[in-house]
Amino acid sequence: MEISGWDVAAVFAKAVTYAATFGAAGAVFFALYCGTLLLDAQHGLIRRLIAIQLGVAAAAGILRVLLLAASMSGEMSGMFDTAFARMILHAGEGRASGVRLAGLALMLFAWSKNRAFRGPAMIGAIVASTSFAWVGHIHGLVPNTAPSMLMCLHLLCAAFWLGALPPLLIVTGGGNGPQIAAAAARFGKLASRVVALLIAAGASLLFILIGSAAQFWSSDYGRMMTIKLLAVAALLGLAARNKLVLTPRLLQGAARAALEFRRSVLAEMTLGALILLITAAFTTLTGPP
Amino acid sequence: MLKPSLLAFALCGIVAAGPCMAHAKLQSSSPADNAHLTEAPKTLTLKFSEAAQLAVLKLVRDGKEIPVPLDKAAKASQTFTLTLPALSPGNYTVQWSAVAADDGHVTKGSFVFSITA
């Protein structure tokens, strides 16, 4: 396939849509799961982070449709041709974008301090983060019910894990040692189970999409998936270090443990962004072999 | 409890899933890629690997685009046949882009043919 500048821009827009949607959803999950450990100022920062990411996710999603239209036509004028946008939206992107926007709108309830609004915000986080399953290679399978549910599980786990990293960074930035240790320990306890689910669902999806090990190096899709898996392995290594080495040191009150934990969370965020970019690239530019 | 049930669910998903479709790829065309024709074709046919919407079709000769009517509101299909205007001898390039109906992915490509007098 020929790759134009519009394709590259569409890949970046998709990666930003992933990151902002997972970021907002993961922050909602984090605020609910670790909320009792957070200071008021941290709650405020996380609410602001959610609001910003909701806006970015919505804008990047719309921009991606326009960039795909430009990619189809090969010219900027394609962005403003409603026929192209209609084709993209009718082919499934409209369904996924509509579900995502509904989820993002529900997550606006996270802005409120009222506990009664936590439920709708949580539902919004689940709806928005699983919206990507409404279009794409897995959705195109026949039948697609079980694979789509596996994809939803994979997306939910990714949102919980990757989306919790910025709030965790906020905690390490403004919290005291015992508070950081308590938040890291509580998050790590559930995160290890979530990551196990993420890997199980991801491995199943991989088998469905690729089928044969030879495809990992003989097809563009497989080669890009291999790069993603290497980045995921590095991310798992960092997460394991956080849980098994740095969190116990935080709980013991070791000097510099908070700083090392913060650096490790930053490294995880960087790797997470790279993984989302690779995913956006191979789901946009290539197809399963 | 969680892990065995998840494993069972994952296995069900793998067993139940049919073959995965890739993006809509151009399987064949008439005129074919690199075809040398002695007579101008009256129609252009594109056949895709799966149902798609044909978004763009440009027919270019010597850098100049020759208009070919394309119904952008047409329903998704695997095969598209378009009526061509009267073509004079020369080298032609066909550029196309399509959106796969079931996975929403955009594919594009081009091929060439020539007509000799």
Image (cartoon, coloured by chain):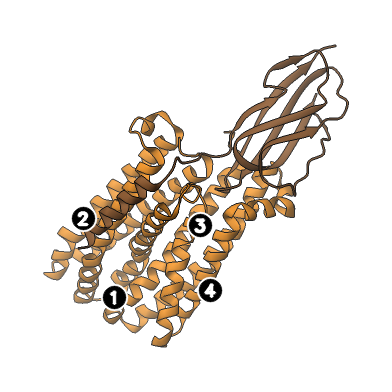
Disc 4 or disc 1, which is closer to the eye?
Answer: 4
**Residue in the image at 49% along x and 61% along y:** A131
Residue bearing mark 1? A34
Amino acid marked by disc 2: Ala
* Chain displayed in brown: B
In primary-sequence order, the first of circles 4 and 1 is: 1
**Residue in the image at 47% along x and 63% along y:** A21
Question: Gap between marks 2 and 3, in whole Å?
Answer: 32 Å
Residue bearing mark 3? A134
Q: Are marks 3 and 4 on the same chain?
A: yes
In primary-sequence order, the first of circles 1 and 3 is: 1
In primary-sequence order, the first of circles 3 and 4 is: 4
Disc 3 or disc 4, which is closer to the eye?
Answer: 3
In which chain is the residue bearing label 4?
A
Amino acid marked by disc 1: Cys
Question: Gap between marks 4 and 2, in whole Å?
Answer: 34 Å
Residue bearing mark 2? A240
Q: Nearer the viewer, residue A112 or B25?
A: B25
Q: Nearer the viewer, residue A264 or A158?
A: A158
Q: Secondary structure at mark 3?
A: helix
What x and y, as percent, mark residue A137? 48, 46
Q: Secondary structure at mark 1?
A: loop
Q: Secondary structure at mark 4?
A: helix
Q: Are marks 2 and 3 on the same chain?
A: yes
Which image quadrant: the N terminus of chain B? bottom left
* Chain displayed in orange: A
Displayed quadrant of residue A217? top left
In primary-sequence order, the first of circles 4 and 2 is: 4
Residue A81 left/right relative to B23:
right
